[in-house]
Image: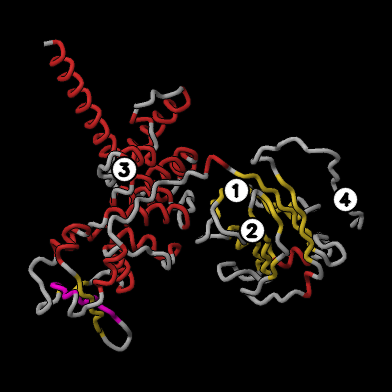
């Protein structure tokens, strides 16, 4: 490979450039074969600056913890604070080996995106394929900011004050009036984790849990089964105003959807749904139908919409899949697909500003949230609420006009 260096020298003031102009960077990982190939061990590049952030490329010569055996992993990491959505591709130069471009939102909580299974290590080391140049693995990074993704799906604010979290500690200054025993099942024995709570808060922020526990108190604890103690504890902390910054969303988002739905913590269910869609829902022909049915059962309208869109784009293959052939006899999936087609046609042809049927689930939720209305439920329920508000407004306007005329 040529050792010639290239530099760009500006004479005078360069014209302003747009933020989303594609940027190109090249990284040389020298002596690739001698790099530690223990799984989980990585090499990180020096930082580069792009789109007002600093970035580095992280290479796992033996794969990260999620990689299949024998694979090389490669990730793009944001090393500065803040959030930005970026379209990027990581390319092994001169060998036409590249992963598809992907757009992801890099944040303080999720600063890194990339590929656990980039390429088989044996292929990179193979002399016949010649991916290494004098032992150097060259990675090309192409980046483009995606301003349209900067406004992500609505995550409602936790309605409780964070000051309430201190009440979870059972003490004389804040005596509880309900106790929960959550089953902890181990190989040795069954035991219980104890949680104290306050019925008034549960009635306000977890009404289903309050209803389930109405015949229990501190002297007669309610035994909770079917939910992990860590998940139940996270739900209670949320009810008392705590943000769930330490949750492993990739692992626990679906469990939190189930628990929040069961106990009536609507805003947590929606947050877990958004996190699940972001971190866990890699749709395939085999799982899209199951995801649709799960989302439908939990009234997770955003997840259901995403599954429907994937099904629309891959309808031919999905109709042939075993998952579709074995799905229940109801026609909800087919009707949702047909409505999805209709929405897409409206969006392409230019829908009217208040055509709620053509709006995405996130748009519907944002409008309801701004009006301080319930944002939980199916797409049909969200549309019905907005139409109800519009009809009430029309009735008020007509009444005012009649009053002025008289």
Q: Earlier in the sequence, mark 2 or mark 3?
A: 2
**Local secondary structure at mark 4:** loop
Q: Which part of the image, by quadrant, shows the C terminus?
A: top left
What residue is pinned by disc 3? 369
Q: CA distance from mark 1 to mark 3?
A: 27 Å
Residue under numbered circle 4: 6
Return the x and y of residue 278 as percentages of the image width and height.
47, 53
Residue assigned mark 2: 76
On whether residue 261 falls in the magenta region, the answer is: no
Instruction: Write the residue at 75% across / 35% down.
Output: 15
**Residue at image location 20% in from the left, 71% down from the top:** 197
Whether label 3 touches label 4, CB < 8 Å = no
Judging depth in this view, the residue of 174 and 362 nearest the camera is 174
Give residue 137's position: percent from left, percent from top: 78, 62
- Helix, strand or loop at disc 2? strand
Q: How many marks?
A: 4
Left or right position of 167 against 55? left
Report whether residue 325 is seen. Answer: no
Q: Height in image: 64 above or below 377?
A: below
Residue 177: image x %, image y %? 13, 72
Q: Which residue is mark 1?
A: 86
Q: Would you place residue 192 above or below residue 369 in this image?
A: below
Q: Which residues are magenta?
A: 174-185
Say which of marks 1 and 3 sits in front.
3
* Mark 3 Cα shell of 10 Å, populated few (<14), some (14-19), many (≥20): some
Q: Earlier in the sequence, mark 1 or mark 4?
A: 4
Q: Are marks 2 and 1 in contact (CB under 8 Å)?
A: yes
Tell me how far mark 1 sits from mark 4, CA to CA: 26 Å
Residue placed furthest toward the top = 405
108 relative position to 209: left or right: right
Element on which disc 3 rests: helix
CA separation in Å, label 3 and label 4: 52 Å
């Amino acid at each position: 490979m040529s050792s010639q260096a290239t530099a760009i020298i500006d004479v005078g003031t360069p014209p302003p450039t747009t933020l989303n102009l594609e940027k190109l960077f090249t990284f040389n990982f020298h002596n690739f074969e001698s790099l530690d190939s223990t799984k989980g061990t990585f090499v990180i590049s020096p930082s580069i600056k792009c789109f007002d952030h600093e970035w580095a490329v992280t290479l796992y010569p033996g794969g990260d913890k999620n990689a299949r055996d024998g694979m090389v992993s490669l990730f793009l990491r944001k090393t500065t604070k803040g959030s930005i959505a970026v379209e990027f591709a990581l390319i092994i130069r001169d060998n036409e080996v590249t992963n598809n471009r992907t757009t992801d939102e890099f944040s303080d909580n999720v600063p890194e995106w990339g590929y656990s299974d980039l390429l088989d290590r044996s292929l990179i080391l193979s002399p016949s394929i010649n991916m290494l140049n004098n032992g150097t693995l060259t990675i090309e990074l192409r980046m483009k900011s995606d301003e349209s993704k900067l406004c992500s799906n609505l995550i409602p604010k936790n309605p409780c004050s964070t000051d309430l979290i201190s009440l979870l500690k059972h003490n004389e200054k804040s005596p509880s009036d309900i106790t929960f025993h959550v089953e902890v099942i181990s190989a040795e024995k069954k035991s219980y984790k104890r949680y104290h709570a306050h019925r008034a808060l549960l009635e306000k922020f977890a009404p289903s849990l309050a209803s389930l526990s109405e015949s229990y108190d501190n002297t007669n604890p309610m035994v909770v089964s079917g939910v992990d103690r860590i998940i139940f504890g996270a739900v209670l902390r949320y009810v008392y105003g705590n943000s769930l910054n330490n949750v492993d969303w990739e692992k626990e988002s679906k469990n939190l959807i189930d628990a929040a739905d069961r106990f009536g913590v609507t805003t947590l269910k929606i947050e877990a749904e958004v996190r699940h869609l972001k971190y866990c829902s890699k749709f395939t022909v085999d799982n899209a139908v199951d995801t649709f049915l799960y989302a439908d059962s939990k009234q997770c309208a955003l997840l259901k919409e995403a599954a429907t869109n994937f099904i629309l784009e891959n309808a031919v293959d999905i109709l042939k899949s075993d998952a579709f052939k074995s799905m229940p006899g109801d026609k909800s999936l087919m009707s949702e697909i047909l409505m999805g087609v209709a929405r897409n046609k409206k969006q392409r042809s230019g829908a009217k500003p208040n055509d709620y049927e053509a709006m995405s689930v996130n748009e519907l939720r944002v409008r309801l949230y701004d009006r301080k209305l319930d944002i939980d439920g199916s797409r049909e329920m969200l549309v019905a609420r907005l139409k109800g508000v519009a009809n009430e407004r029309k009735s008020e306007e007509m009444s005012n006009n009649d009053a002025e005329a008289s």
